[in-house]
Image (cartoon, rainbow, N blue to C red):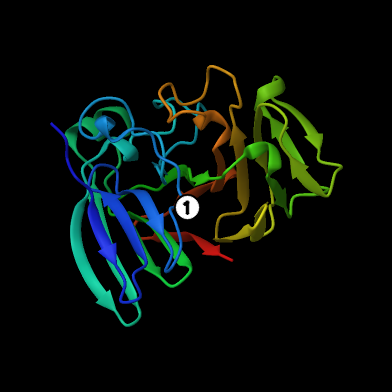
Amino acid sequence: MSVPPITLTAPDGARAEVLDRGGQVIGWTPAGGGERLFFAPRSEYGPGPAFRGGVPVIWPQFGGFGPLIGHGFARDLPFELIEGGAAGALARGVWRTTDTPDTRSVWDFPFILTVTVEVGGPRLVVRLAASNVGERPFTFSAALHTYLRVADLAQTTLEGLGGLRYRDHANGDVYTRQTEPTLRFTGEVDRIYGDAPPRLRLVEPGRTLTILAENFPDAVVWTPWDSPRGITNPEPGGSRRYLCVEAATITAPVTLAPGGTWRAAQILIAD
């Protein structure tokens, strides 16, 4: 059964669509602009495979870096909308989920996970907060697995990562360094950059996108290009119409003490 998203609409017409499943943003239209996120066909709403596109929440494990299912279980959990409406010039929604018998069977820690989405003008803000409500510390990694829509990946560049060391998952997880100041795309890319700068810039012919990270020290850049690891049923030509640029904490997982709360955010600004 399909579950439609909740739409947040700012006074200036900017809007975001968010699913209760996973607290996942699946659409973002800046004021006066067009859709800036990529998403797979909407028939994938509801139970079943993870929804591919938008901004999946990756928690408490990134990828296969641990014993849990790849990318953790947060994106499969039901989130409850606990706050929604206008906040000045913005539209704002707050979604929350907590541990369940199923999560405790694989990761035995009580938690509260909150996703806050703010939209207005040229901005989309996605905030992630994890609270330890148990009696023991726990350790996690996390990411906002953001699928950015582009017109043609072959004509797209990403600025801000020049000179940084990265783990190259597409080539056997070797560590290497990006020598070019601007990243261009001609094939599969799957990289984890440690100690990434908090500001990156996606450049396309005729438009740009500023990508800001708060308390996310790493950045993941992923395009499957034509590899089978991509979305299995994208829109026509879709394999060249998205690039994942993820704000993440992977290389130094977070240890959260009882009663503690960790907060981070990714901010997208359509220029």
Q: Where the C terminus falls, by quadrant?
A: bottom right
In the displayed image of the protein, which residue is found farthest to the top?
228
Given residues 106 and 231, the one toward you in this image is 231
**Residue 54 appears in the picture as rendered:** yes
- Relative to 95, 36 lies left or right: right
Q: Quadrant of residue 187?
A: top right
State the image coordinates of residue 37 (x, y, percent, origin top left): 45, 48
In the displayed image of the protein, which residue is found farthest to the bottom?
88
State the image coordinates of residue 42 (x, y, percent, origin top left): 28, 35
Q: Residues within 10 Å of mark 1 (few under 14, many from 20)?
A: some
State the image coordinates of residue 26 (x, y, percent, origin top left): 35, 47
Number of numbered discs: 1
State the image coordinates of residue 40 (x, y, percent, origin top left): 38, 34
Seen at 49% across and 36% down, the residue is 62
Query: Considering only vertical position in the picture, is 261 above or below 141?
Result: below
Q: Quadrant of residue 121?
A: bottom left
- Relative to 29, 251 lies left or right: right
Query: Considering only vertical position in the picture, is 167 above or below 48?
Result: below
In the displayed image of the protein, which residue is found farthest to the left?
1
Seen at 46% across and 62% down, the residue is 33
Q: Where the N terminus falls, by quadrant?
A: top left
- Relative to 269, 9 lies left or right: left
Amino acid type for the residue under numbered disc 1: Arg
Given residues 185 and 163, the one toward you in this image is 185
**Residue 112 appears in the picture as rendered:** no
Q: Which residue matches tag 1? A: 36
Query: Considering only vertical position in the picture, is 183 above or below 105?
Result: below
Helix, strand or loop at label 1? It is loop
Q: Quadrant of residue 270?
A: bottom right
